[in-house]
Amino acid sequence: MSFSDDSRPSRLISPPTPPTDPPDTHDDSATHEIRAEEDLLTARHAVREATLRIGFGLVDQTRIVTTASELARNAYVHGGGGALTVELVQRAGRLGLKLRVTDQGPGIADLEAAFEDGFTTGAGLGHGLGGARRLMDEFHVHTAPGEGTTVTALRWKTRP
């Protein structure tokens, strides 16, 4: 997978700071609108920058960027657009990267089926949502017909 230059700037995530009292500390976040095809590339670049900034290895970088790409594409294609928020998270001495993708689309009518390999509502292979879930350490979906979808996925850099 290669990444080409994109002329639009993206905000870098600040270096981690020591955890504070709350269970989850969000050191920095950046939100990227997903409204056009080129926004998918911009979002991928921003996520890759974030993984590099906090020191993920190549395999985890690939997992996270692939997940972000799939979720952003789903929001664009099935949700009519949306937003991707990238957050640096610290919890109990662990450092991670959280992705939150939201859209205001029709929602996912059958969430269990959507996680099954081979399920598709479009021209894809049907590995997207289930594949994205397998690539991350934590994965949550909130969806309701007619109310849109929010997917939150987190990959830990440091594990207990």
Image (tube, rainbow, N blue to C red):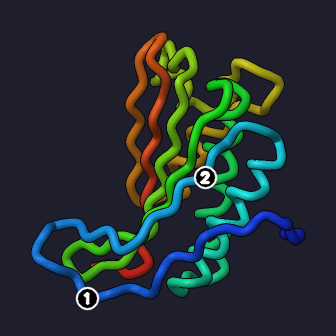
Q: Whole-percent x and y of residue 149? A: 48, 28
Residue drawn at (89%, 69%) of the image: 4
Measured in 3D between alpha carbons, the distance from the residue under mark 2 to the one under mark 1, in whole angstroms, is 26 Å
The answer to whether 145 is drawn above or below residue 58 in the figure is above
The amino acid type found where label 1 is placed reads Pro
- Name which residue lies at 69% across and 51% down: 69
Residue 12, percent from left and from top: 58, 76
Judge whether 32 appears above or below 75 on screen: below
Is disc 1 surrounded by few (<14), some (14 to 19) or many (20+) residues within 10 Å? Answer: few
Circle 2 sits on which residue? 32
Which type of secondary structure does the marked residue at label 1 adopt?
A: loop
**Mark number displayed over residue 5:** none
Tell whether 31 sits left or right of 66: left
- Of residues 133 and 9, the one nearer the viewer is 9
Q: Is residue 17 left or right of residue 80?
A: left
The quadrant in which residue 77 appears is top right
Residue 97, given in percent of the width and then of the height, sits at 45, 68
Residue position marked by numbered label 1 in the rendering: 18
